[in-house]
Image (spheres, helix red, strand yellow):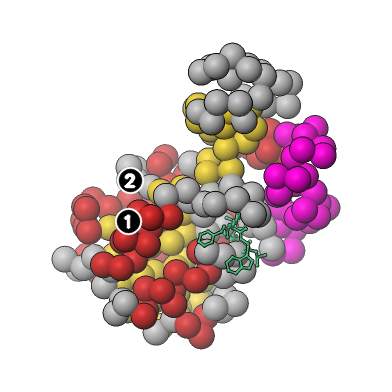
Amino acid sequence: MTKTVVLTGAGVSAESGVPTFRDARGLWEGYQVDEVATPRAFRARPDIVHAFYDARRASLETVEPNPAHVALARLEAGLGDELLLVTQNVDDLHERAGSTGVLHMHGQLRSALCVGCDVRSPWTGPLGDGPDCPACGAPELRPDVVWFGELPYEMDRIFAALDEAELFVSIGTSGAVYPAAGFVQYAAARGARTLELNIEPSEGTHWFHEARHGPASVLVPEWIDRLLG
Ligand code: BJW
């Protein structure tokens, strides 16, 4: 079996109705990135930042996994421990499709992080009304997402898997945000074959050995059918 690292981005959830970030009508249309996606923005205007994430958390109730998420769950069943599925997405559509070992490097909407005690708690409701932390009781919860300037989660585990990977596949990400955008070069330098599946060439498309362009709901099941035979 092939040791495989798959990286997904907003494009894998686009056909489920979750907006991407940088496309037209993306999440940041109407917002400046630095209004909502930095620790400084949160300190300056927690009301705006909470409203942005509370709305996105609530909208998860209206979306469902698409065939790309379902196929990736099938890949996990086929490859077992040989697969590490890393997502930049903060939605839970991989889990709802049946994936169990997903590494959310940019955090999760359905989780809250306590600024006081650093404990992460499952969370489905709003945070804007200042609820207490279930662990320490302080009313200091923030969205458990990784903003610009913060360290993404579990980087050691990701780079260890990239060190060993024979195949690295990037799905539905623009390649605009580091460190995820650098995984392709890192994996290729250590001997992995690299494949991009995206609706259009990403910013880093030239770094991949192979790139296929089309909707994730079509390309991902096709690729996985062929891989699993
Ligand atoms: C489809 C499709 C369909 C559409 N089918 N495809 C150089 C090196 C290292 C770091 C930096 C650097 N320069 C600057 C930095 C710092 C910064 C950074 O990258 N800035 C850039 C603006 C340049 N990075 C950081 O600050 C990160 N931390 C960090 O670097 O710490 C230090 C460190 C050093 C070394 C090792 C480790 C750490 C933190 C970044 C945090 C990003 N956070 C966000 C917000 C999360 C919360 C939230 O959701 O609101 O994460 S930003 C946003 O972008 C979000 C996403 O996960 C991320 C990536 O976006 P993604 O998924 O690619 O979405 P889009 O919209 O950009 O693209 C979608 C793609 O899908 C497009 O290509 C479409 O065409 C395609 N598509 N429909 C297939 N149907």
Q: Position of residue 156 (x, y in %)?
A: 38, 55
Q: Quadrant of ligand 1?
A: bottom right
Q: Give the residue type that dot 2 points to.
A: Gly
> Would you say 5 lies left or right of 115 here?
left
The residue wearing badge 2 is 101
Q: CA distance from mark 1 to mark 2?
A: 7 Å
Q: Which residues are magenta?
A: 23-50
Q: Secondary structure at mark 1?
A: strand
Mark closest to the chain's N terminus, 1 or 2:
1
> Would you say 41 lies left or right of 182 here?
right
> Would you say 42 lies left or right of 172 here?
right
Q: Looking at the picture, does residue 174 appear above or below residue 151?
A: below
Q: Position of residue 28 (x, y in %)?
A: 75, 54
Res. 111 in view: yes
Q: Is residue 157 magenta?
A: no
Mark 2 and mark 1 in contact (Cβ < 8 Å)?
Answer: yes
- Identified at 16% across, 66% down, the residue is 1
Nearest the eye: 61 or 189: 189
- Identified at 52% across, 52% down, the residue is 152
- Identified at 52% across, 44% down, the residue is 107
Asked if the beta carbon under badge 2 is closer than 8 A to the nearest atom of ligand 1, the reply is no
Nearest the eye: 225 or 20: 20
The residue wearing badge 1 is 84
Location of residue 124 (image quadrant): top right
Q: Secondary structure at mark 2?
A: loop
How busy is the neighbourhood of tag 2: few (under 14 within 10 Å), some, or many (20 plus)?
A: some
Q: Which residue, as the protein is rendered here, is positioned at the far left?
A: 1
